[in-house]
Image (cartoon, grey):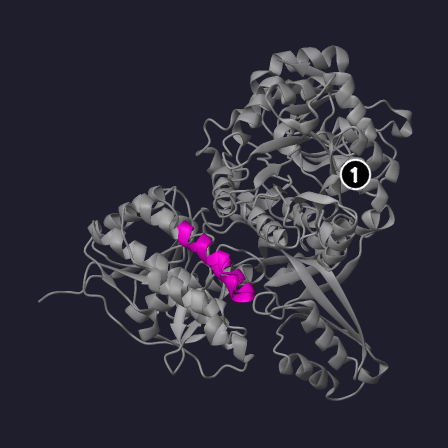
Amino acid sequence: MSIDKPVVVLKFGGTSVSNLSRWQQIISIIKQRISEGYKVAVVHSAKSGITNLLEEFSTSRNSQLIDEIKASLELLADELSVKVDLSDYFKKLQDYSHQKILTSHNIAKILSFGELMTHEIACEYLSKQIELESINPKNIFISSSDDNRALATKILSAKCNVGSTKIIKDCAIMPGFIAADENGKTVVLGRGGSDTSASYLAVSLGAERIEIWTDVHGIFSANPHVVPTARLIEKIGYEEAREIAASGGKVLHPRCILPAEQNSIPIHICNTMDAGGSGTILKKGYESTSPRVRAINVRHKITLVSMDSINMWHQAGFMGRIFSVFRELGISIDIVVTAQTNITVSLDTADNVINSEVLENLKNELCRFCQVTIYKNCSAVTLVGYRMRALLGQIAPIISNFAEQRIYLTSQSSNDLNTSIVVDEDQADKLLIALHDGLITENANQYGFGPTWEQLVSKKFENPPQSVIWWKKEKDTLLEIAKESSPCYVYSKDIIEYQIGLLKTLTSIDRIFFAMKSNFNPDVLKTITQNGLGIETVSPGEIAQVKNVLGEFDKEKLLFTPNFAAIEEYQQALEQGYYVTIDNYTVIRDYPEVFKNQSIILRLDPGHGSGHHRYVRTAGQHSKFGITESELQNVREICQAHNITVKGLHAHAGSGILEHQNWHRIIKYLTEKTTIFTEVEIINIGGGMGIAENPYEHGLDLEQLNLIVTEYKNQFPHLQFWMEPGRFLVANAGVLLAKVTQTKLKGDKGYIGLETGMNSLIRPALYGAWHNIVNLSRIDDELNITATVVGPICETGDILGVDRKLPESEAGDVFLIANCGAYGYSMSSRYNLRQPAQEFFID
């Protein structure tokens, strides 16, 4: 008599199925599980980036997006050496591109194509190496009719009933994200819904466990890109994990946990590229048993709705009338807090589509009952743990340090598993770091957390990029310079040239200009231009510096991009023959004679900004930069009337951007506008390229960025593509050295004062920027204290780093602040009449 083998469900996300090396790793994992005596059911997402493109297509019906999707999938198929016919999908997309209105079912069908096309490639590839069968999710996942949400939400973020099924062969594969309604029409499970598909399939098969394979090791106590000392949570119960997922933890989709919990199926989270490494296990019996904070998450772009009325006081049913408005508009609510005459709610960002039209309708309906105020661009910082009320005494002193900042609301969950604090977006990460250090870092060993993210990732980076840690090799040289000349900036020529080399791998880029506002040091400018790059300037002073340092500089290699400058500055730059960028409609409207018979570049506002802080986002409604879409026709008419040639279009979304899709959005926007300005020859995609801030981080994926630009270059072969990075080229190449002046330690916490502060490096105070800080004199000593590193300026905000793990330090020790080669000296001042750090350059 044969005995059925146990089943394990393996889920692989979009990043994990996007190239050959990842698929080879997937095959290795499948074969390992089969050798262990399991039947394996694989659930996969669409190739990374495809769903984003399909979402965009469903909104714009832009047929150019079909070409991008096709090119991306053909690239994967070629890399896997398989041939598949996806023409039917592309024909259907072409048909949809001609429809003026798409129903929610149409959109669900379109979105499902990402998984379905990836599935065809995957089946073809795996079948060459493993005998397998394919599972159609629409046969076993049927959307629930017992669902009171808005119709569009029920179709595009469906909840399902699950039928039972079996697999015959040792391996089966199923596309995630997809289900059907009672009539067999396609519905989808919402973004991240492939996790839920894996959970549903595990229930359907009676699986022994679910393995979620992703690009991180598991659930961490905080976002490790903000808190590098975040600890891995190795074991956790379902309920706490669900709270973490719902409060902004992105490793698991919140909805995938409940089916597993109800059927006592453990969930293992594993790193695809570290198959034998540590991970997180969700399982019954792993619940906390004493008060503790497990994780702290941040959700950005939160919208609050505050409703005031004296009529709600002692009025039965008032809240019911208010909340019925939200129900009728299909808007779900996350946090609710009440007072005698006020109700404030945050809107659930997981399922809601929150745009200006939705908010305007909501406000108009609510104004029948109360006065309404809407607060946008807030962030919710949520602490998740067990018996949270017992920890309020530890939480309160940390929050009290933010007394000068606006706290919109605080909320304590009824199940005592979370506490949420809603603040302005630019304060959220600061609050996160302070709470994590006070509540988790100091108690991590006691609470039984796993290794830190730094420790896990450092195993993969035994030889981190030289551009990030070059200063370790130059320790003796740097200490010698600091001995006589601190405080000082020191720049490495080798690292600048290393970064230039990385940029030159972008074969799709025709010309690179260095944004010299980031660093105008003469030796830096010479190194940049000797390697063939141009210079982007923003003032006559910068143009003068270029001339002083470089002499007669090729006019074709100099850009002038002023902002709210006097008209004389534009006039002088044009007379000197430089490329001039205009970023304000009124400049052309008020002074058309200045630009008559000239060629110019227009800086457009694509309508959205990116970056780590609102002050570095240089596009969108709240930014002063760029010509808005509504002004373009007026600009065109003025240009035609005065023979002004628009030679190029430019956009720049912000700084510190690590998501390569940002440039897809920018290039798409700019190339679309060439239908208005048909003489355009240049597309300047700006800068803002994020860097690796420490040895254990990845910077921007240049390979993916190059693929994006190449796709557009193939579509528009007559256009040149330019870019103008600044920080990417020089940030890693510069360090700030300063001696310790005083220390103030209380136990194992305190302050370490340096001889310079915000007068030399203002980025932490201005942007909340994070810079790695080390005691270079004691680089190999144990990190046994937690200290806030401050400068000598008489300002509360003169803080260079908060609660850093450092060795015991003494006056005279040399501290090194990393990644200061950009916007350090160039933004320095003589505030308090203290001289800023001087500059040195080493070959």
**Hey, what amino acid is under mark 1?**
Pro
In the image, taking residue 217 as reference, residue 805 lies left or right, namely: right
Q: Is mark 1 on a helix, strand or loop?
A: loop
Residue 698 vs 308, above or below: the answer is: above
The percent coordinates of residue 647 (x first, y second) are 67, 42
Query: Foreground residue, 748 or 524?
Result: 524
Q: Residue furthest right?
A: 833
Q: Which residue is drawn at 77% across and 28% down?
A: 826
* Image quarter in which the C terminus is found: top right
Q: Which residue is drawn at 77% across and 20% down?
A: 547
The percent coordinates of residue 677 (x first, y second) are 66, 51
Residue 114 appears in which quarter of the rendering?
Answer: bottom left
Crowd class of label 1 (few under 14; some 14 to 19; many from 20; radius 10 Å)? some
Q: How many marks?
A: 1
Residue 324 vs 810, above or below: the answer is: below
* Image quarter in which the N terminus is found: bottom left
Residue 525 visible at all: yes
Q: Residue at x 37, y 45 (%)?
A: 19
State which region is magenta: 51-72
The percent coordinates of residue 187 (x first, y second) are 43, 73
Q: What secondary structure do most residues of the magenta stretch adopt?
A: helix
> Which residue is the site of mark 1?
562
Residue 421 appears in which quarter of the rendering?
Answer: bottom right
In the image, taking residue 39 as reference, residue 767 lies left or right, namely: right
Q: Which residue lies furthest to the bottom in this view?
A: 316
Residue 755 visible at all: no
Query: Foreground residue, 402 or 59?
Result: 59
Query: Foreground residue, 419 or 507?
Result: 507
